[in-house]
Amino acid sequence: MAVVLAFLQGLCQRLQSTIAASDQLPLGVNKELEGLLKAFRAIQVTTVKAAENKQSKSKAVRTWLRELKAAAYDADDLLDCLVLKAQEPEVEASGREVVDQHCCLIFNCGEEHPATQTELIMIQDIRRRVQKLMRKKPFSLHLYRRRSSNLMSNQIESIEATTPNSGEFGRDKDKEKLVELLKSDESSQVYLSLVAIVGREGVGKTTLARIVYNDKEVTSYFNLKLWITASEIYDSESLSTSIMSSTGGRGQVNLDAQLVAGRSLLVFDDVRNENIEWEAVWEKLQLAQNGSKILITTENEQFVNKMRLPSTSYHLKGLLHGDCWSLFRQCSNLEAAASNQSTTQLEEVGMKIAEKLEGLPLAARLLGSLLCCNANLNDWKMILDDEVLDSKPKELCGIPAALWLSYQHLPQHIKPCFSYCSLFPRDHMFDKDDLIQMWMAHGLIQPQPGRQIEETGNEYFIYLIQRSLLQSSEREYMMHSLVHSLAMVVTADESLCLRGTDTSSNQCEKVRARHLSLQSGNLEISKILDSGMLNNLRTLFFYQTVSSNFEYNALFAKLKCVRVLCLSDERLINLPESFGNLKQLRYLDLSETAISTLPDVLCSLYNLQTLKLGMSLSWEPLAKCTPHFVNLRHLKGNSDNISKIYKIGNLKFLQELEQFSVIREDGHRIEELKDMKQLRGVLRISDLYAVHTEEEAKQAKLNEKEHISKLELHWTWTLEKVDISKGSDDLVLEGLQPHQNLKELEIFRYGGAKTPSWLQCGYLTNLEALEIRSCENCDLRLSGQLRCLKFLKIHGMRKLQQLGCGVCEEEEENHHLFPHLRALHLIDCYSLMELIPLPSTLEELKLDGVGLAELPRLHQNKSGTPSSSSLLSLHISNCHSLTTLESGLLRHQNQHQLQVLETLNIEHCSQLFHLPNHGFSALESLKLLHIHSCFQLRYEPVENSTATLPSSLINLKITSCPPLPNDSFFMGLKGLQSLDSMFIEWSMPALPTLTSLPEELLQHLKALTQLIIQDCHLLVNVGIQSLVSLKELRIQGCSNLVSCSSSVDTDEPLPLEFLKISLSPVEFINRKLLGRLTSLKELHISNARIVSFPEEIKDGLDSLISLKRLHIQCRALQSLPDELASIPCLEELYITNLPDVRCLPEKGLPASLAILVIDSCPSLRDTCQRGGADWNKIENIFFVRVDGLNVKDLNPTLDF
């Protein structure tokens, strides 16, 4: 099929613009071009639109359109050749950009340079071909009439489309069943079994698989989870490579180590290739543990039988009508469309449309997005009554009707951009900027007055997302497999993907192809070079995957029309001279090659718009090219190298320049920036010490660069260079005034004392973020007119004493400097003694190394009462002048203003003595409280105080605050029923501290899952048996701990999964407690002063039925207990620093053990070698490492 109308519209515009320059055309060309334009316009106006809508059902129409598109391509190529003929002398003379206006050509030829006879004949030949097609158009096109609709408007409206995950609708039961199958006990004794989700394309297999993959039950059940997209994998070797790379890319040994650690789940999504030898894949997974699963999604159930595993097929059906309608309704945003109107009629039509969608979630999303925010009832009826919607996929080249209809109703200028995506693999993750730049290279984006072509392309891209033809997830973009099939059908005659041994495309198709993605593999490249196809190519993605060298000279000699060229070949070191023949090239990507230098012929590629080069490439040769790259808009590579390109200012239309390094040499001065007015995004100017005067700084003309959103101005920090710029920095910064559109500004190591006037006067009315770092001499004065400022960070201004000077009288009266500020970071401002009242909008406050004696207060409104605060996070650290929290923000009477505060960190405040009265009990939303290294901080109970901590607290950490963790403070634990994690530590036993965490106190912590107690030397008792949700317990340096007794006599299991005892007695663990640890998976006993394991522990080891990993590090230990062999499911054993242990236990090790690691055990180093006394005890263990060496000759670098 073909996308013709939009291409013809652009071609006719080019022809008309060229004809308009009639006095500058070669003799004889004007008349011929007028005839050609007339022929194209006649067929465009009368026939093409109808033909595009009929081509899905008519082979004759498809053939007719293909021939018309070929004629249009030839005309476009001819125009480009005429452009090229006149372009070189014009570029050399003026250095003027010709992109987007190459149809308004300057043919300085006239009568002195008449067109050649060949050129005139070619124009006449194309005109005759078009006229012939007009006379012989298929009969069905004479009868075709189609109702018009604003759905076909060429104007793209901005819509807030909602594209919900289709898994939210009607898939709950499917999810439950699949989770049950993955966790089923029936296959628990089989090392690997298969669950297959089988269903037609678009029914939601991948979405459902992803929901199941991310399910909490599934995540906790499987130790290892891997997701492999298999749609573009053609052999078992590639699939095995994908599996290993997903585990960290460290080979089979690393994969095996993860497989033996527990059950594994591998998802192979979109299995569609019959050539994969699955037995070879399963060999790589032979160490998978019983209960491991393979989950595949596929259309073809025959793949299930070929995999030869115990299997269950789950046939996924379409959504029920009600669920399909709900999804369609939400995507159409019906309420927003109808506003105050009744939606009854639209709902009636919409439900009928949903009935025709066969329960396909993708179809519901596409048609719902098509009608999004559209309240025109006639448009809804037009979709319902469209004959395409009643067609079967086999009538539409295998594409469901809803998808085809969605494509038909794309604006004409968007269709070529969508269809171009067919050139990429099914699982391709699109880079938005790359794709837009490729569209630009082919002229697929219609220029709009007053807008950059990239902005319009971005609008196209967003529109495809809104229409669900592209899917977005966390800044990644991809195309659904079925939508990709639609794009391939639309461009079947123009786009071609060849990989490996693919011979499916016949020679005729290859000759017609205009866009080619070629992965060499085992392809016979010579046949492709001889086919004639390369002469017409406009796009070539060439991936050289075989080890042999490739002769690029023959390739480049044939690429006469190529606009986009991407080369991937790690063996390609140099470009041949023939590369200079690619005159039409607009987009060149060499980033995946080993090219280290560029040939001079690159300078002749005047049409280049985008150039991507490797990070290690030498950029000196580009210095010769910059005067010739008059169209270059995007230059990608090493930003440091780019910043040092000689005369980079010649690239006047460059859009991005992340960094510019100033050097006091010709071609590197700051004046290079003066004409680069198209720069946008982020610009960092470094080494500003090399700029000496205000006039020199003004030559950069930063105030004219309206598209720059973030500006970074960097000086230096070496004393030698500071001396050079001493006394001039004030003037230089004044001259670097940016455009008032600027949103973010960073000033680094500025040596001046004055704040520039443009930062004081309110000139930067759009500034949202300001960061000033290491400007030690600056007397900072900020304007209260920075009313859009949301983020302010001041770092390393050691002489700054006040923040808030320089405000107008009204602001002084209100003390409201930044009314929209959300984040304020003040770091290493040791002299700062005064801070403005904080605006109510502030969400994050960080005070680190400031000289405040008390915390700031909140801004008061006009009535004199404090405003309610939006503060979410408060961080106070290294504030050594701060003595009390009973004033300012955290004063108990002020805490009611901080009703949304969730995070409070107080660290390294050496002179802080007092907590607020009543503690933090009034902070009703506080979730995290960390207090660390405040050695003087104490809590003195207030009379009638009932609580020190708020009940909302989830995470509590008190460390290195010796006077604070006492019995009185921790009485506040009683109300913490939401507390999930608690960490208590202090290291000064001479001070009165907490002596007990009794059961009566801890029993209130119903939600606590993690408890860490460290260096609590006087702690005697911890009532851990009352912690009914505890999963992780770490006890370190509690030398007097003797009891964890419980007043309740029960054998009910505890949920504890992780236990670590270090530098603490182990005797508090008794047989009774071990019997309750049936969920324990990991146990560490480290540095305990024991010669042998206590009898109660040895007798209880067989109770640890879930224990998988055991670490023992006890220097005084004389022997390992025989009872180790009784641990039923132990898989990993780590023995460290046992110098007196002579041998492994006499009864050996558990039969389930798969990994044994021994370090710093001299005797065991000898007994565990081949032939050693303990070899028979370990020879059946999969992996054994002793002092870093794998004694079973596996990879010695493997880490666990």
Image (cartoon, rainbow, N blue to C red):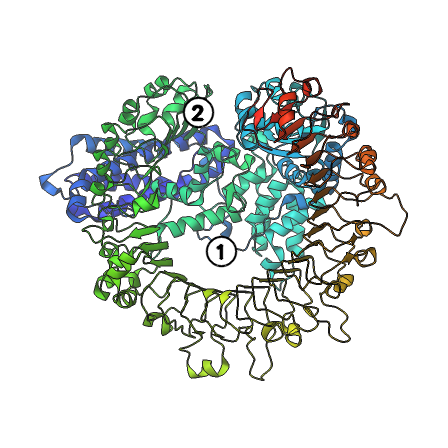
**Front residue (pair 168, 38):** 168
Does 524 appear above or below 635? above
| Disc assigned to residue 158 | 1
Q: Residue at x 82, y 36 (%)?
A: 1095
Q: Residue furthest right?
A: 1049
Q: Position of residue 1117 (x, y in %)?
A: 71, 34
Circle 1: residue type = Ser
The N terminus, quarter of image? top left
The C terminus, quarter of image? top right
Q: Secondary structure at mark 1?
A: loop
Res. 199 visible in picture: no
For marks 2 and 1 on the same chain, the one whose residue lies earlier in the sequence: 1
Instruction: Tell me how far mark 2 sits from mark 1, CA to CA.
Output: 37 Å
**Front residue (pair 1075, 474):** 1075
Q: Residue furthest top?
A: 1171
Does 1053 appear above or below 1172? below
| Residue 161 falls left or right of residue 126 | right
Do labels 2 and 1 touch, CB within 8 Å? Answer: no
Q: Quadrant of residue 745?
A: bottom left
**Other residues around mark 1 within 10 Å, as few (<14) / some (14–19) / many (≥20):** few
Does 1164 appear above or below 585? above
**Front residue (pair 289, 1051):** 1051
| Disc assigned to residue 498 | 2
